[in-house]
Image: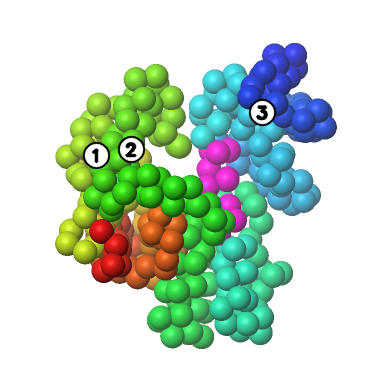
Amino acid sequence: MDKEGFRRYLTDREQPIPEDQIVENTQMVERFEEFLKQFGKTLETAVEEEFSKFSKIMIEEGSNSYLNYAAISRYAFFVKNMDLYLPVLAIFDGGEVMNVLHERLGEHVGEEKRDEILPKEKLPPLGMPDSEKMKVTREVVKQMEKSLDPADCKKILADVAHGLPRDFRKGEREKFLKAGSIDEYLKQKRENAIAELEKHRDDGSLFYNQYITDDVVDFVKSRPDVMSGERRGNTIYHTKIPFMVQEFLETTDEKMKRYYACHCAWARESILDDEVDVSSEFCHCSGGFTKQPWEAALDQPLEYEMVKSVLQGDDECSFVIQLPKDVE
């Protein structure tokens, strides 16, 4: 382990990592490095297989904290081991969804009903493999559909919104007011989205979990509904950008196309597993996430409908957001 280089990496940045975290990060990476020796691997050559085994140990002993996973992801990025970095990064993707769902259930239907559906003691641990997450999701949604009416299920799941804080998009209000109209705001959103993709393509950096190619940029440019959404009358028609766009574009297999489209770590693996069927109702979590910036921009709650979902057999996920009649 390059301790000095790692320390410089953690401190030579706009927001330096605190000293106590540097010490803890270093200790965790050293421990992972020692673990890898039994497989003849190093921190530079480790891949998802070894990390998954180590993560299982972390869960069993209770050391599966965000800080400890962050330590491994930071070092993996420092040494440019993307085969290790990406699976560790995936731990954080939607990691809080079930915890937030637990909270939202309590807020919407009360603690007693919440504990019938998703009691605190059954909340999945951070680091749970996606192959296990889908089973949790299947059972939780089944319980919700059994105990609640469809409108409440939709409302609660939409309020989860990928587990993000409710004020996560608060900056959108200022952007909208500066734009002066829905059409101009949407135009700027689209220009910014494409510019961001082009920047990642040009400098070879990751866009969340994936590298951006010319094919990806061309695909988004050809689909005004993807990423930013497209105005259609008094609605915004928004299609999610695929989770792995290049793979989505290249595959001709219908099931794999749906798999590459799906962003949800709590459901994606079910697309490839004939034994586990996750209800598309769970996609209302993504519906809430999709309308969140628009609600922040327009400073009011908005209605939406899910019109496509990979969990119900479509090859992409799309939502229609209803715009208020009194806003231009």
In the rendered image, which quarter contains the N terminus? top right
Q: Which residue is drawn at the image coordinates 67% and 39% (left, top)?
A: 69
User: Magenta includes 275?
Assistant: no
Tell me where the magenta segment starts and ends, as one range.
Answer: 87-97
Task: State if disc 2 and disc 1 touch (CB < 8 Å).
Answer: yes
User: In the image, what residue type sits under mark 1?
Assistant: Val
Q: Which residue is drawn at the image coordinates 71% and 21% (left, top)?
A: 11
In the rendered image, residue 3, in percent from the top left (x then y), is placed at 75, 17
User: In the image, what residue type sits under mark 2?
Assistant: Ala
Q: Quadrant of residue 100?
A: bottom right
* As drawn, 201 above or below 233: above
Q: Where does label 2 land, which residue?
A: 193
Find the distance from the CA under tag 2 to the CA under tag 3.
25 Å
* As drawn, 49 above or below 147: above
User: For mark 2, does the 10 Å Cα neighbourhood hold few (<14), some (14 to 19), or many (20 or more) residues?
Assistant: some
Sequence order check, earlier mark of 1 and 2: 2
Sequence order check, earlier mark of 2 and 3: 3
